[in-house]
Amino acid sequence: MDKLFQISGKNKKLRAIYHKVFGNVASKFLIVGIIILFSFSTAIYYIEKDHIKYIQNGSNLEIDNRNSSNIRNFRDSLWWTFVTSTTVGYGDYYPVSTAGRITGVLLMFFGVSLVGVVTGNMASFFLDRQLKEERGLKTVKIKNHFAICGWKRDMINVLKDIIEKNPEFLVSEFVLINNNPPEDIDLIRSDPDLKGLQFVSGDFIDESILNKANIQKASKVLILADQFSGKSIQEIDSRTVMGIITIKSITKNIYSAAEILDAKFERYLHTANCDEIILTTNYNRSLIANASTGSGISHVVSELLDVKSSVSINTSDIPETLIGRTYSELSDYYSGNNEFILIGILENTGNFYRRKLEAIGEAQKTPNISTLVENLKLVKTLTANRPVFNPCGDYIIQKNSKSIVLQGKGA
C-alpha cells in the first residue's frame, strides 16, 4: 500500500499530506475498501450482464423484465454494491444468477466489516479530539485571540472581569495557558459565562507550548503572577520575565501585559519591550498608604477600577484631526460630551516595539548628524503607555496618543 501511494521525497508538502491522509491503518483500509467495492461493482456487472433476456415483440426485441436481471449497466451495479455493502438493502436492484448471489453474500460480509471500521474510527477520532481539548493537548487554530498565561486563586471572577473589559473578543477567543489539572479548567468551563473558553496545558515559558497556543497569531497576551503556586516571589517574577522574552522572540507584534510582584524586575520587562506592566504589590502599598491619611482616596480608586461601576477611568481614541494640536483644543472637543471628562493624555500607546521603530524612523529624517544623535537619545527614553495628567493648555498631542477620561455618569 505504501508503494502504491509513494510520493517523492523531494516534495515535503506532498509527503506531509500523504502521511496525514494515509498514515494510519484505518485510512489505508478505507482506500482498499473503496477499491474492492469498485471491483465488486465491476464483477456483478459482468456476471449479471449475461443474464439479461430478450423477447420478440413484433419486429422489435425487448428485455424480458420477468426473467432478466435488473442490473443492466455499470451505474446500476455501482448503486447495488454501495447499498448492499452499507446493509441498507433497498431491494430495487438485485442479482438473479447463482454467481451473482454468491458475490452478494461476500459483499455483505465485507460491507459489515468496512462499515464497522469506518464508524469505529470516526467515533475514535471525535472522542480523541474531545479528550485532547479537555486536557489542553489540542493545538489552537484561531487567530487574533487573547492568550492568558498563569493562574490566580479567584480565576473565574478574574476571567469574567477580563472578558467584561475586552468586549471585542468572544469567549471562545480567550486561550488559557497553564499547568493546572483539567479538573480546574472543567470547573471554569462549567460557568455559563465562560463556556467555550480554550485551554492549552503546559508551561508558558516553553516555546513549543506557546506555539501550540498559536501565540504568533495572537492579538494580546497577559501573564498573571500566581502568588499561591508555592514558588518564591523571585521565581514567580523570573518566570514572568522569561515568558515575555520567549513570547516576544516568537512575535514582536503582540500586545503584552505582565503582572509582577517585585518592582526590581520591571526594568527587565521594559528591556523585553513589554507593553504594560502591572505592579500589584506597589498598587496595594499605595492604596494602604493613601487610606491611612483618611482622604477616602482608596474608595475612589476602587470605584474607578471596578469593571461593573457606572463610571470608570478609561482611554479613548483621539480624532486624527486633533493629532499635532494642543491639549486645550482637545479639552474643547470633550467639553460638549457629558459622558466623558478629560483628565490627561496617554502617550506611546499600542505595541511598543512598533512605536520604537516609528520613532527611530522619524529620528533619522534629519541630515544633521548632531541632531540625529540627539533624536536617537530621545528614542531611548521612550516609555510605553506614559500617562500625562492635566498638562498645560499648549501641550502638543503626539501621534499614537490616547485621551485619559472618566467615562460614564454617576447616579
Image: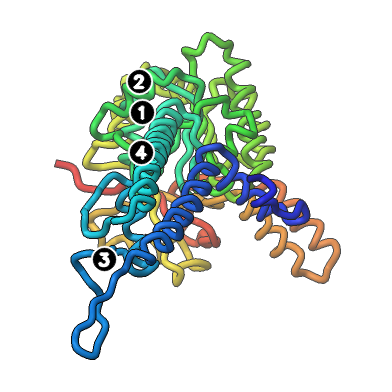
**Circle 4 residue:** 112
Determine which residue is flagged by label 3: 68
* Element marked by disc 2: loop
Q: Which residue is under mark 2?
A: 154
Q: Amino acid at mark 4?
A: Val
The answer to whether one can see residue 53 in this image is yes
Closer to the camera in the image, 135 or 312: 135
> Considering only vertical position in the picture, is 194 above or below 59?
above
Q: Are marks 2 and 1 in contact (CB under 8 Å)?
A: yes
Extreme residue toward the right, this view: 369
Contact, mark 2 vs mark 3 (Cβ under 8 Å)? no
In the image, 336: left or right of 229? left
Along the line of sight, which residue is nearer the eye, 391 or 133? 133
**Residue found at x 35% / y 43%:** 105
Spatial separation of the CA atoms under disc 3 and disc 4 = 28 Å
For the question of whether residue 198 can be seen, the reply is no
Circles 1, 3 touching at the beta carbon (< 8 Å): no
The correct choice, above or below, for 322 with respect to 191 in the image is below
* Amino acid at circle 3: Ser
Give the residue at the far bottom of this rendering. 59
Q: Nearer the viewer, mark 4 or mark 2?
A: 4
Whole-percent x, y for residue 275 in the image: 56, 42
Provide the residue designation for mark 1.
158
Q: Going by the picture, which residue comes out furthest to the top?
A: 230
- Answer with left or right where residue 381 lies relative to residue 303: right
Alpha carbon distance from label 2 to label 3:
77 Å
> In percent of the image, x 39 and y 17: which residue is there?
153
Nearest to N terminus: mark 4 or mark 2: 4
Q: Within 10 Å of the Cα at label 2, are there few (<14), some (14-19), or many (20+) other Cα atoms?
A: few
**Alpha carbons under labels 1 and 3: distance apart:** 76 Å
Colour mapping: rainbow
